[in-house]
Image (spheres, rainbow, N blue to C red):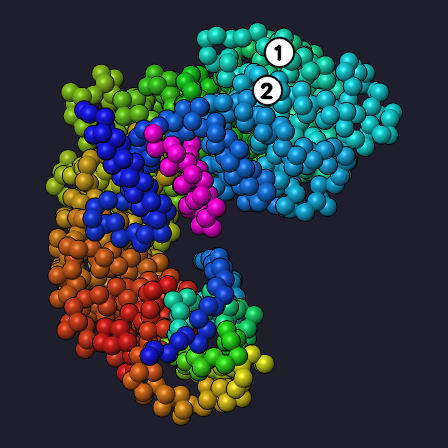
Amino acid sequence: MTLGLINANPVVHAKKKRVARPLDDPHADDAVDPLEIYDIVRDIRDPEHPYSLEQLSVLSEESITVDEKLGRILITFTPTIQHCSMATVIGLCLREKLKDCFPAHFKVDIKVAPGSHADEEAVNKQLNDKERVAAALENPNLRQLVTECLYSSEL
Amino acid sequence: MTGSSALNFWNAYWSGTLMLFSHWAMNFSIQSVKPKSEDIGVSRDELSRALLLAFAATPLFEPFAIPLLLDKLSSSLPSAKVESFKYLGYCAPMYGSDRMAKHGGALWSSVKDVLYTSPESALSVESESDGGMIFEESDIMVEALILLEGLMQQNSDLLLDMILGDEDINNFICSFLKPWDIHDTPLQLRQQLHSVGRLLAVSAKSSMASCNRVFEKFFPQMMEALGCSVGNHSDESFATEDRALSSRFNYGTLYLCVELLDACRCLVLGFKESTSFPDFIHEKWCCMLHGFCRSLINIFFSNLEAVSGNAQSSFAYTGVKGLQLLATFPRSFAPVSLLLFENILLKLVSAITSNFDKKFSWGLELKALVEIGLYIEGYQESEKAATFARIVVDKFVSWISSDEPAMPLSLKMQAICETGMTGISNMLRIVQGMEKAISAKFTQAYVDGNFESVELVIKVLECYSARVLPWFEMNGGSEEVAWNLAAIIWDKIDNSSSVNLTVQNYELLGAAMTAMKQAVRRCSQESQEKIVNRAFRVLSASTLFPLKDSPFATSLSNSEDSYLNHHVDRVSCRDEWIISLYASVVIALRPQTHVQNLKMVLQLFIMALTKGHIPSAQALGSLVNKLPSKTNERHLSQEYGVEEAIDVILTSSIWNFCQSNTLRKCSLFGGGNEIHNTKCLAGLNHTSVHISAIVGLAWIGKGLIMRGHEGIKDITMTFLGVLLENTNNGDFPESCDPIEGKEQEVIPLMKSAADAFHILLSDSEDCLNRNYHSVIRPLYKQRFYNSVMPLLLSSTRQSNSIITRSMLFRSFAHVISETPLSAMISEANKLIPLLLDSLSTLTEDVMHKDVIYNVILVLSAILMDKNGQVAVLENAQAIINQLIGLAAYPHMMVIRETAIQCLGAMSELPYARIYPSRTKVLQAISKALDDPKRAVRQEAVRCRQAWASIASRSLHF
């Protein structure tokens, strides 16, 4: 017997239009901003469905804050259901993606939105404990799942 | 065939058809199938087209196809809806009106769903800002309207019954018959209004009978709502009635009314194009419109006045559009009499005059006038044309030289040009006005530097160059206009004695030169000769010519030195004007055009170029490019061919500073008339003069290189001489400062010699291109590349000075970045090491940053070219190392970005070749992730991903 999907029928939202930023403006403020981070993580695939985190409204530009001076990034994501066991996998994907795309001096905090998950505290603790993250990524199955979510071309 | 076998056949046919359609029904939306059609060589469009043809193959498919298509219209997939409407539109005429009649109700309800119930139109960009009513329809709506149009043509009565009898539509129109504010109306209501307008227009446009029915049904109600009554011809009656005044701003009704007007105008003009032109004056719609015409015009007038009073630009749309439509009804349409037509034009002109600060409505008004002008031109309405010219064109022309109205000059010129472009007679009037303005104001601008006059003349000249002359070239009859412009400018210059030097004056000179070039290049050979002779007369009368009394045939070689000494430091502003304009004329001449007194002219240009006068250098380049090469090709009176001209140019003493590599030593110029008079250059022996001389020589070289003349070799050697001579031999000119000053003197000189290669090979917009009739030998850049590269390479190898090497590499960079890739790619294996060498040398000095960018672009082009792959593979490590260095180049963002892009492209090379560099690249890219510029960071993310994935998905290293 196969296990059913955790959220078999998620609500799918339309992708937002991507607005190209003006190039070649020497005076443009090119500091890292939430939109830049959002552009990097919006296309991560959901571990369960062939939709992006953007389409499932797990992430939005507003849910990202960044302080370039202090080198901190905070991402708050909203799992599609309260008992989503994939929340930690999504968090792992976000952390891996940001590690690849931002210099190491940025401290990344990843949290589930307050009240959006039954085990909010446990999930947050797990996602921000670097030893547990490292251990999780040493698990070949988890590593494969994360890699598939990050580099999948199914979208 | 027996009865039973026929029955069997039909049964088989029906069951086959049913199966076919049930299969089609499942696969209808071809887009839902993943487009992997490349595998089988059939595209989605071809499949869709084939299915369309299959559906329409026979009317017998109608009972299957139409329900299927109607069913698919309820799909949520937009592409399925678009396809369904397209199929219905195509099948309807094939199946015939009888078969389609039974689906009329269903078809109307689906069209109504799309157009009225849930319209998907989007506000256009310009309309978005002011909450207007200009919508862009979605693809589904467009297809639905096309279907509706087709059905109306097929069976207008049936559909019209449904449309006119539709309660929703009727109620909607009635609800809009009372005044309301467009800005307070929700978007959906505005979308519906737009859709209803389109529905009425499509219905009215289909035939005279439908037009009559639509008018009968809605027009009287609309007129009543607007407060119009038949025969109400008094202009004042509206202004006194408050009720009527408020009803004039009944936007919904006005909008629908304009749509109806547009539809019936299209109907009439459609008939006018065909041979049988009916007498539509007795049609009901025409009579109704006739009755209300004057009142409608009054309402549209008050809409325009409302615009000038406040910012209700949505009324501008209806007002202007309505007036434009009424003015462009055919002449035989009696209600819009010539008097009314005149009134409409007067009103639009006065609105344009007063509304210039309201960009949106001003643009609409001008566009309406242009449309009216184009209509008159297209439909040959002579009376209206005369009125248009008198009221609009003449009025606008009078604006050129007048301070009234107080609108910005650029807007005035825009209005003038656009109305002129409606027809040749209008344009000629405008040209006359512009000629008068130049005649009147040029002297004021040129002599006194009067600010307003300068601004005006600059604008008029720009208008000539950018709009008027190109327009005449497209529409015929340009020569006289071009010739007149050149003649006027030369007359004005000739008649003035001095010029006031101001900054604006230089702008004016720039505009005059461009206009002169544009005018002369469009003239025939004879006219060009007249212009150049006229110009020479002015030139010879100027203070530039101390020798004007002596015969021009006299050799100047003796007098040249004193002449240069005398004049080089004091060229007056007027002389600069004259020589600049003369140079512009020369630049634009045809090769066949004969230039009088060529030797004098050449000497003069040489003198001017030592002052850094680039147009003179360009003119010299143009002359040597276009002069005939052999004696028998020459015009009888042509005193010089290219060889003699080059001889005159290169014997000049201004090149003496590079005497040790002098052009005179070259075999080509072994005429024996070398000049070794260094005394004459005593006053010129400055770096700036030398630089000017090198730049001048580069332009001359450009003229030669383009025609494939051998003389370019000697010029190239001169540049190389300058590059090598000064540092290798320590052979500085006597006047140079002691050792510590040497670099300051020499580096700019060497840089200009290196940059000469850029001038030689780059394409220029100012001269020496096809527009200016240049002689261009095919593949000249390739030939030059092949001949100059060995020289550059051997020089680089021999050079032991850092500065010389960097300057030689700068020249090399210019050559490779201007040569087509195809010429270089076959020798990519030799080129790449040099290219890398040049990059490492050039990065040491920030002054080379632009050149580095050009080199890295060449490198990226080689990386992307299939033919360069082998060479890239051989040098992979070296390329990667160089690119890693450039990824951190601090002085220019695009260099970093392009270097990282190139690194990304390198990751495509075979694994074994690039794997050793992987760690190094990833480390370098990690630093780029922290780049201050976003574009570099984004590129770094992509590059890092590409390099990380060559071994595994993991980024660990």
Query: Vertically, is B415 above or below A59?
Result: above
At x 34% / y 78%, what residue is drawn?
A2
What chain letter is assigned to the residue under label 2?
B
Query: Vertically, is B805 above or below B332?
Result: below
- Tag 1 and tag 2, C-beta contact below 8 Å: yes
Q: Which residue is mark 2?
A: B211
Residue B926 coordinates in the image, percent (x, y): 35, 77
- Is residue B753 at all visible to an observer of this figure? no
Q: Which residue is mark 1?
A: B283
Residue B514 coordinates in the image, percent (x, y): 44, 33
What chain letter is assigned to the residue under label 1?
B
10 Å crowding of disc 1: few (<14), some (14-19), many (20+): some
10 Å crowding of disc 2: few (<14), some (14-19), many (20+): many
Q: What quarter of the picture does the N terminus of chain B occupy? A: top left
- Is residue B906 at all visible to an observer of this figure? yes
* Marks 1 and 2, how far apart at CA: 9 Å
Front residue of A19/B794: it is A19
Magenta stretch prevailing secondary structure: helix
As shown in the figure, which amino acid type bears the numbered disc 2? Cys
At x 18% / y 77%, what residue is drawn?
B916
Residue A133 coordinates in the image, percent (x, y): 40, 88
**Which label's residue is closer to the chain start, 1 or 2?**
2
Left/right placement of residue B871 relative to residue B392 reads left
Magenta segment boundaries in residue numbering: B60-89
Residue B209 coordinates in the image, percent (x, y): 57, 16
